[in-house]
Image (cartoon, grey):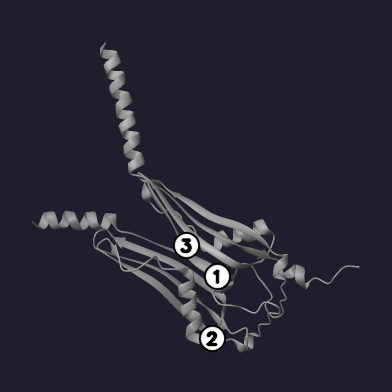
Amino acid sequence: MTRRLFAVSVAGLLAFTGCVARSDLTAVSSKNVKLDPLRLDPSRSKGRTSGEDCTHIIIVIPTGGPPTIDEAIDRALEDKGANLLTDAVVEYSYFYIPYVYGLTCWTAEGDAYDTFQ
Amino acid sequence: MPTTHSSRARALARLAATALALLASTGCTNRIGDLTLVSTKNIDLSNVSIDIRAGKRVTGEDCAWWPLSIPIRVPTLEDAVDDALEKGGGNLMIDQVTWQSVYTIVVIVYTCVRVEGTVLDTTAAAKPASN
């Protein structure tokens, strides 16, 4: 019994997969941004903000649709009442222990600005 | 006669293996983001004036093969946007759409991040008109 449990644990660990992909962006937005003209004053930054959109996988069933980049960015922007992120980091992360549990996420972090102010 | 039988059996086995490989192949593409503005390049955002009519629609992608389903390198949004900006000769992308694709052929995985958007060059707009 112990040997069988050990074998199942080893097989589970070997089948465990996960990864993180990081993207560095100088500017990103999912909201309407005034582009003509766009004048950002660093002193008017609303500070660093972050947001994420995740989906859990229970056994083999996802708890929702695939997470999206714009939802993660939306949440980061809405946290500060902003519409643009600069010096942003957008990360995709994923891990799955087959037939047990998994988590897939998009996270966004950056300096928040409101271009309409 | 035995030679004909064995060659027929081999052909059948090959056909069965091909059919099995095709049945074991899966793939999907998801639209994972709609961004109004994105850039990976240095931009002076303190004074930008952009005429969006000057932009052109460009597609960029970052793809990777995973032999034995081992994620050796994961495609990134950054590299896909870089590819599109370099193809379009610009430094800013607007009205951008991102797709993520995963195709599995038995134990080989091909995965991509694709972006499409209007590429603009903010430095061109800032340049004084030449006489």
Q: To which quarter of the image does residue A60 belong?
A: bottom left
The amino acid on which the numbered mark 1 sits, given as a three-letter code, is Leu
Which element is circle 1 on?
strand
Q: Chain of mark 1?
A: B
At x 65%, y 79%, the residue is A34
The image shows residue B124 at horizontal and vertical percentages of: 76, 67
Residue A19 in percent (x, y) is at 39, 61
Q: Residue furthest top?
A: B1
Label 2 Cα neighbours within 10 Å, binned few <14 / some 14-19 / many ≥20: few
- Residue B103 can be seen, yes or no: yes
The image shows residue B47 at horizontal and vertical percentages of 72, 79
Residue plotted at (69% across, 75% down):
B44
Amino acid type, callout 3: Arg
Residue kind at label 2, given as amino acid type? Gly
Q: Secondary structure at mark 3?
A: strand
Residue depicted at x 18% and y 55%: A8
In front: label 3 or label 2: 3
Pick the front one: A3 or B93:
B93
Q: Mark 3 to mark 2: distance in Å? A: 30 Å
Q: Going by the image, does B118 lie left or right of B16?
A: right
Q: Disc 3 designates what residue?
A: B31
Task: Note whether B32 is above or below B18 in the view shown.
Answer: below
The circle on residue B35 is 1
Q: Are marks 1 and 3 in contact (CB under 8 Å)?
A: no
Q: Which residue is mark 2?
A: A47
Q: Chain of mark 2?
A: A
At which x and y percent is residue B122? 71, 70
